[in-house]
Image: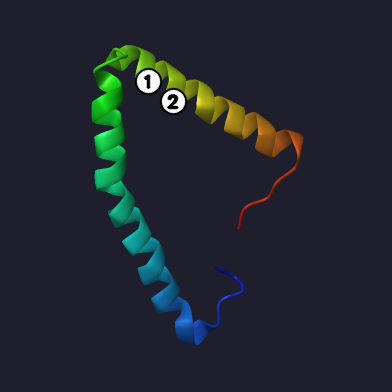
Amino acid sequence: MSCVDKNYLSRAGALFNAGGSGITPIMSWIIGITVTFICVSKIYLICGIICILFFILTKTFKMEFE
């Protein structure tokens, strides 16, 4: 967002919000199908492992987010 002109900042924010709102039903559908094959506790475990790997990779490659 730092490279967005201040005049267009609200429009860029609206696009991010629209993307987040649009992905919600898609992810709900994907999780609903996944739950029929895997129990909820394993889904939590998988998501936790993905988050931990993400944070390890960001520290390993020294990625910085604004």
Q: Are marks 2 and 1 in contact (CB under 8 Å)?
A: yes
Image coordinates of residue 63 in percent, x first then y, are 70, 46
Residue at the right extreme, as displayed: 61
- Along the line of sight, the residue nearer the viewer: 24 or 2: 24
Question: Quick one: SS at disc 2?
Answer: helix
Image coordinates of residue 30 in percent, x first then y, are 30, 33
Mark 1 lies on residue:
44
Mark 2 lies on residue:
47
Q: Which mark is residue 18?
A: none
Image coordinates of residue 47 in percent, x first then y, are 44, 25
Q: Residues within 10 Å of mark 1 (few under 14, many from 20)?
A: few
Q: Is residue 58 left or right of residue 43?
A: right
Total of numbered circles in the picture? 2
- Tell me the amino acid under the disc marked 1: Tyr
Q: Residues within 10 Å of mark 2 (few under 14, many from 20)?
A: few
Residue at 30% across / 55% down in the picture? 22
Q: Is residue 24 above or below residue 41?
A: below
Residue at the bottom extreme, as displayed: 7
Q: Quadrant of the N terminus?
A: bottom right
Image coordinates of residue 31 in percent, x first then y, are 29, 30
Q: Is residue 5 left or right of residue 14?
A: right
**Colouring scheme, one of rainbow, by chain, secondary structure, one colour:** rainbow
Q: Quadrant of the C terminus?
A: bottom right
Residue at 26% across / 26% down in the picture? 33
- Tell me the amino acid under the disc marked 2: Cys
Q: Is residue 10 above or below residue 38?
A: below
Question: Quick one: SS at disc 1?
Answer: helix
